[in-house]
């Protein structure tokens, strides 16, 4: 392949109705087309402070330490775990889908002692199950996903916060798939560290990971602070805790970069910051409660819509996230072929599935910018045509095929 | 601070003539305003392949493993080092400025046995100095910066590649600050792993780290591959090497994500990918040699320009990067106050300095989109006014001040 004939970027029009990423809100993309400023420009530092304030509203927290990690949502998860967990620390992960396995995997790489509990895919945990495990394991950190797109389930968190306070455990939550589309209360629920991404209900592109850190978690992280040799103050000594294994994802340093000290670390990904700021600004402008209600409405419309097409729905619907539904593929239908037809003929993307659900369900999202009436109804109309493969659309498809 | 009154993003106009980040090429920002597509959409995977091909041209390599790490240039550095270096491995870092210290710092966090050699700031290494140290240390990896903006120096690399082949050492290079503005030959010089960023001579925003990996380095990294439990094939076993300490920056997994297997890892930061692709596309369209010549021309103009203003230049100018110059602050002048005036009155940013050069030099860049005649001449004209503080501009400034 030679690169000499490659033209400007020109993506095909797509309506992205999978489990994310979804179409970005055009206002977010416009914000990202703004020109750069220097990273210590007074306007830039003020804009970073505004972004912190906006995400405090989004996470519903008063945490001073609320900012962005410069990477995808997975970078946020790893930053949280590698900064909290020292080698040998115990961590408990309740696993109810693929992203619980990811937390386990990342915690293992932190050389933590990882304990898991599991429920079958399509279910969530009762608080008592988690408390029993906390009592048995006595972990430093309980690490839990709120919404796991692999199963569409949304784990209730309020009781877990209480359990963690009772047992003096730090509570980390991955809210990537759920934040903005489902009720979320960092402070009221007693969450210590929460990370997210832009590419789900926040209506932006992947590549920036908002994070919030409670004071008690920040103290644990700061207890491991080792400032880089090139930029440390002459009288600065290392904290007693074991140095964090990553430099890039070292939250002790990243807090000093976003904080009043403005200590040089990475070069802030300014365009992603513009996008992350706009995602939060639009959400705050709409109102968090209104955004959750919008996701609830369009999620219910999609749920009843696929049922109206005679399709079954996977999992405990009472605990489903608002923003995604797992739809059972009809017997005898090639699910991937149907997805390919939806994409080729209608420009609509719906999702396949992982692990035990692979080949059994499609995952259809209604989130962020695409939690809209026209997006829901267009998707259902196209899906109906693909399920039928006769009638007016079939006649037009024959024209294209010939 | 309440977030309720925060308006859309609206940065002030700035001409960024520091050591980077600099203004993004408007064509790159336009590419980044394109709408998203799904991460396994055939158009998306084709676009990822195009991006790989473009960066092969930029790095001047035939390496199959040429792609993007989703983070800032520092994420690329850490991905390279944490994927190559197992705990206890020896690494040699020739330090000639701040970013050599950063390589040391990151390698330490990989629990490698880190050895350094140093030259005074403003100088580069002779090949013999490096070979003597390689012979003494017998490292697995030699990790070196090509262009260190902290000193403006550009380390010659061709001889280092030969030394590494001779001693069977892997050669890693951080080309963040130099790539696109100075001669660079990954294959001809025998470099094994090279990482970069967009925010210097490539004319894009920070947030994506292009990387290229030779076959022999890829084999070392693949020797440590541990695919995540949730997505591994049933018959897949772990490689014998110690599992890479990071999941997010695990290049063995990232190679499988960009490669034909398309194995799920992170969710690609699509907007940053659009930007990175356009940066490379514009560079290839201009021609690599032409781009280097352009940086040489405007760098020389700036160098002679500041000398024409009677200012001294720091360091061994024969080994200066084309794209940045360290300008001695005149005796008795408050360098930060002068920078603040340049920013407030002319909208022009030039850089301060780190470590031993702090307060002694300004760093002025001519790179990427800003390696242009008007940018150079405007900056020199404004700097001349700030140095004079009398005359026509001073009269106008008095109007603004009153």
Image (cartoon, coloured by chain):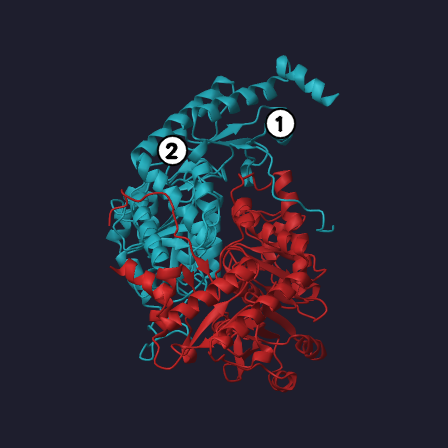
Chain colours: A red, B cyan
Callouts 2 and 1 on one subunit: yes
Please tell me the numbered disc located at residue B319. Answer: 2
Report helix, strand or loop for mark 2: helix
Q: On what subunit does the disc labeled 2 rest?
A: B
Q: Which residue is drawn at the image coordinates 68% and 48% (left, top)?
A: A260
Closer to us: B322 or A10: A10
Q: On what subunit does the disc labeled 1 rest?
A: B
Q: Earlier in the sequence, mark 2 or mark 1?
A: 2
Residue B33 seen anywhere in this rendered image of the structure: yes
* A170 sits left or right of B111 in the view: right
In the image, residue B203 sits, relative to residue B216, either above or below, namely above
Disc 1: which residue: B338
Work out how far the residue at label 2 is from the one at label 1, CA to CA, in angstroms: 27 Å
Rendered location of residue A12, percent (x, y): 39, 52
Closer to us: B215 or A15: A15
Question: From the viewer's perspective, is the residue at label 2 or at label 1 nearer?
Answer: 1
Report helix, strand or loop for mark 1: helix
* B288 sits left or right of B385 in the view: left
* B375 sits left or right of A338 in the view: right
Please tell me the numbered disc located at residue A294. Answer: none
Rendered location of residue A295, percent (x, y): 60, 65
Residue A244 seen anywhere in this rendered image of the structure: no
Rendered location of residue B242, percent (x, y): 38, 70
């Amino acid at each position: 392949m030679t690169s000499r004939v490659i033209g400007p970027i020109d993506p095909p029009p797509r309506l992205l109705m999978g489990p994310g990423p979804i179409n970005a809100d055009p206002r977010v993309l416009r914000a990202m087309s703004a020109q750069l400023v220097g990273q210590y420009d007074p306007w830039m530092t003020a804009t970073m402070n505004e972004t912190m304030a906006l995400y405090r509203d989004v996470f519903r927290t008063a945490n001073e330490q609320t900012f962005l990690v410069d990477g995808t949502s997975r970078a946020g998860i790893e930053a949280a775990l590698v900064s909290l967990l020292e080698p040998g620390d115990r961590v408990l992960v309740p696993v109810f889908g693929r992203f619980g396995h990811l937390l386990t995997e990342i915690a293992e790489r932190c050389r933590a002692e990882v304990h898991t509990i599991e429920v079958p895919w399509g279910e969530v945990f009762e608080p008592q199950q988690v408390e029993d495990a906390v009592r048995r394991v006595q972990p430093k950190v309980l690490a839990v996903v709120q919404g796991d797109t692999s199963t569409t389930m949304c784990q209730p968190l309020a009781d877990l916060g209480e359990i963690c306070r009772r047992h003096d455990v730090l509570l980390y939550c991955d809210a990537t798939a759920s934040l903005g589309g489902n009720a979320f209360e960092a402070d009221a629920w007693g969450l210590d560290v929460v990370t997210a991404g832009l590419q789900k209900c926040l209506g932006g592109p992947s590549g920036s990971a908002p994070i919030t850190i409670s004071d008690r978690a920040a103290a644990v992280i700061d207890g491991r602070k080792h400032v880089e040799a090139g930029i440390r103050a002459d009288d600065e000594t290392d904290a007693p805790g074991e140095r964090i294994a990553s430099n890039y994802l070292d939250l002790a340093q990243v807090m000093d970069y976003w904080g009043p000290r403005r200590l040089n670390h990475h070069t802030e990904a300014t365009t992603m910051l513009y996008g992350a700021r706009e995602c939060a600004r639009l959400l705050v402008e709409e109102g968090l409660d209104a955004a959750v209600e919008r996701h609830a409405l369009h999620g219910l419309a999609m749920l009843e819509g696929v049922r109206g097409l005679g399709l079954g729905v996977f999992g405990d619907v009472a605990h489903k996230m608002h923003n995604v539904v797992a739809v059972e593929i009809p017997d005898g239908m090639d699910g991937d072929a149907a997805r390919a037809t939806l994409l080729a003929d209608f420009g609509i993307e719906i999702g396949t599935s992982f692990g035990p659900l692979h080949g059994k369900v499609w995952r259809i999202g209604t989130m962020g910018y695409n939690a809209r009436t026209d997006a829901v109804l267009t998707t259902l109309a196209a899906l109906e045509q693909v399920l039928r493969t006769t009638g007016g659309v079939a006649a037009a498809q024959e024209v294209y095929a010939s």
